[in-house]
Every structure is written in structure tokens, then in C-alpha cells.
Amino acid sequence: MLTRHRERDGARHTCPMGTYAVTGSASGMGAAVAGKLRATGHTVIGVDRTDAEVPADLSTPAGRRVAALGVLAACSGILDGAVLAAGLGPTKGAERAITEVNYFGVTDLLAAWQPALAAAGSAKVVAFSSNSTTTVPMVPRRAVRALLAGDAEKALRAYRLFGPVSPPIAYAASKIAVSHWVRRHAVAAEWAGAGIRLNALAPGATMTPMLER
């Protein structure tokens, strides 16, 4: 593995170059993250529908399997970290895709990558949540509970009751569920006990291609 050096407290320390998986790497915040990692010497395995090391559609179980296996093959079973930045906004008629990408596109991939993250010894994971977790009113708790239980159909039924405002409800529910998933798993033996640090970010409105649309 390549290394670089830094000075701290008068001593010279060696910093290993890592291998990181980044979803949503082709645009927006995912592209910014991937660019920052590459600029500091790390290897990035990008996952996106196009223009990525691992082309995959995270809105389907089959696409998520392609993404999971593609990254594991590219990293040779050792992953120093992951940034789950892929996401869909509250687009009309896209409630299912929002659910699949924003929630299962995080949890399914992390479950598949956990052994490779554990193999690194001190892996770092960041999942993108949203400030909509605290700003969107009336998000049904039953939808969040359904997602945490892996029941996409039940979640869809819950927020489709909101009619024309169901897309923002679906978006917020998916992000709340991601935050809850991270909080639950961050302290679990298979994550914290394996030296994997799990965190969620909750950015506000950021001028990305998704927001521009």
C-alpha cells in the first residue's frame, strides 16, 4: 500500500493510502467527496449509474448486488472506508426509487461490505442523511419503522396516503430511517467492535445537479 508522511509534535508519522467506496460518485456531493479523496492520494471505487468504476443502478436489488460485488472485487476484500452519497430527491412519482436508493442503497451495501471494512481494522463510513429529518413535518413513524424492518412495500403504502406531497414524505422518511440505522449499528459489536466508525451527515440544501432539477 502506498504511504505518505506528515509531521506532528516534531515526529514523522506514516499515513497509509486507503481504498474507499463512494456511491453517487459521478455528480454532486458524491463527486466532490471522490475528488477530495483522490486529491489526497486515496484510491476511490466510484459507484453510479454511469461514469463510475462500478456502474450500477441502486434503485433495484439486482443493481445493488452488482454494486456490492463490484466494489468487493475491486478492493480485493479490504475496504478502508465508504461514503454513501447516492440519493434521489423528492421527485413526483419516484417514491419507490427514493425508498430504494436513499435507504436500501445505504443499508444493503454496508451489510455486504461489512467484512471488507472489518478487514481494514479501522475503517471509516459516512452515510448521507439530510436536514429534512428535522424539517419535514408529519413524517409517519410507521414508514420509518417499515424501512428499518426491511419492508419497502409497507413504507410505500404509508407515505402514499399523503397524495401529492408523498414524494417529500418519502424522501424525509428514507433519510430518517438511514439516521436511525446508523445510530443503531454504530455501537454494535460487528461495527464498533470491528473498528468500523459509522457516522451520518445531515446536509441542508446544496447546489447540486439534483437540487437544480
Image: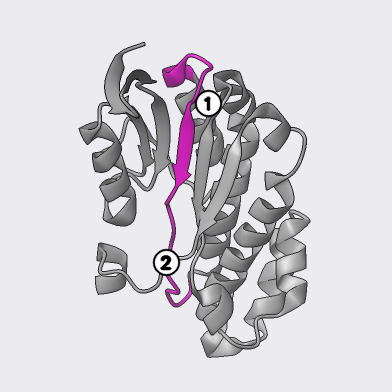
Q: Can you give x and y, in whole percent of width and height, for residue 183 in the image?
A: 68, 55
Looking at the rendered structure, the secondary structure element under dot 1 is: helix
Depicted 185 relative to depicted 28: above or below:
above
Give the mark, 2 or 1, whose residue is nearer the N terminus: 1
Looking at the rendered structure, the secondary structure element under dot 2 is: loop
Q: Can you give x and y, in whole percent of width and height, for residue 36 in the image?
A: 26, 41
> Which range of residues does the magenta coloring cover?
73-93
Tag 2: amino acid: Pro
**In which quadrant of the rendered image does the N terminus lie?**
top left
Report the residue at 63% width, 30% height from top.
Answer: 195
Q: Which SS does the magenta portion mostly show?
A: loop
Q: Which residue is mark 1?
A: 69
Residue 159 in view here:
yes
The answer to whether residue 152 is left or right of residue 204 is right
Which residue is at the front of the view, 145 or 135?
A: 135
- Which label lies toward us, 2 or 1? 2
Depicted 10 relative to depicted 130: above or below:
above
Tag 1: amino acid: Leu
Residue farthest to the front? Answer: 10
Report the residue at 28% width, 19% height from top.
Answer: 4
Q: Can you give x and y, in whole percent of width and height, for residue 61 in the image?
A: 59, 43
